[in-house]
Amino acid sequence: MFRLVPFRPTRDGKIKGSLRPDEVDLLKGLPSLLRPVIESDLDDPGTKRLFPEASRDDPAVAAAFRSMVHDDLVRQRLGAIDKFESTLDGAGIRGWSRKLEVDEAEAWLSVMNSARLVLGTRLPVSDENPLPEFEPSDPNWAPSLLYGLLGELESYIVQALSVAEGRGVIDISPADFDE
Amino acid sequence: MPGTAAPAIETEVVEELDEFIDLEEMVDFDRPWLVIVWNDPVNLMSYVVYVFQKLFGYSRAKATKLMLDVHRKGRATVSSGTREKAEADASRLHAHGLWATITKDV
């Protein structure tokens, strides 16, 4: 049997997810990767990336924004992780398969994207080195594989959500890159 | 204008400018705030287009153009309005993992 598309839109406006057992195992680690970063107090580069400054030149504007927004943002992100965890259960030896509601798929997208951002600060990922490669002996080996997998899964779920939310497939064509 | 002597032309101009500048400060709140999204090496292009369409209701074409502006030029202004609106837009962008800042338009 061919490998199923990880996330695809369904006729009834939902998102069908199908993951292999090894993918499920990796995704199960995302909550414990993210919760400490979200709940930390801004010392960690991952935390700084999830809660960036809202002004580059005015500390008062940035401080006002942070005090207004930070707690709510923490709540939203933790809520997404809870929803993700509750819908990822039920995986067996053949993997995981489930029809997700749009709000559940959006929670999945939030969790995968947040994980990519956090991993991106640790590998680290940069414009000069957008897909860092490591030797298996390097501690960054497994995180870099996870980063790559999450990018792949995210690209599928974004398309599925765009269709389910009525905006169609997102295809960025070569013509878009013409100056 | 008070005074019996006719003012010199330079003084007239300066006084009018002073009045103009005071008026400018009084309507300061009318100048919009801009929401700027900055490039980053992690977020997928399709994801950024998705976020711009979902949050702002932009067409595929406009969302794609904005994304490519961010990608090529390092930043792009994605919305503008009152400070409250700019803060709300920026917080939604942050919730989606994009790096947004707000700034007063010049």
Image (cartoon, rainbow, N blue to C red):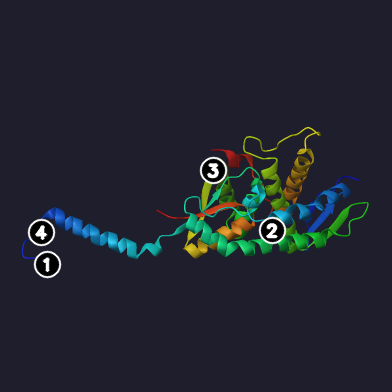
Between residues B61 and B72, which one lies in front from this camera angle?
B72
Q: Chain of mark 4?
A: B
Say if mark 1 contacts mark 4, CB within 8 Å: no
**Eyeballing the image, is A149 above or below A39?**
above
Q: Quadrant of the N terminus of chain A?
A: top right
Q: Which structural element holds mark 4? A: loop
Upstream in the sequence, badge 1 or badge 3?
1
Q: Which residue is mark 3?
A: B74
Q: Name which quarter of the figure residue A31 lies in.
A: bottom right
The residue sitting at 37% across, 62% down in the picture is: B28
Between residues A10 and B52, which one lies in front from this camera angle?
B52
Q: Which structural element holds mark 1? A: loop
Decide: few, some or many residues near mark 4? Use Cα within 10 Å; few <14, some 14-19, many ≥20. few
Q: Name which quarter of the figure residue A32 lies in.
A: bottom right
Q: Which residue is mark 4?
A: B7
B53 sits left or right of A28 in the view? left
Please name the amino acid that badge 4 sits on: Pro
Q: CA distance from mark 3 to mark 4?
A: 52 Å
Q: Which residue is mark 2?
A: A39
A48 sits left or right of B17 in the view? right
Please name the amino acid that badge 1 sits on: Pro
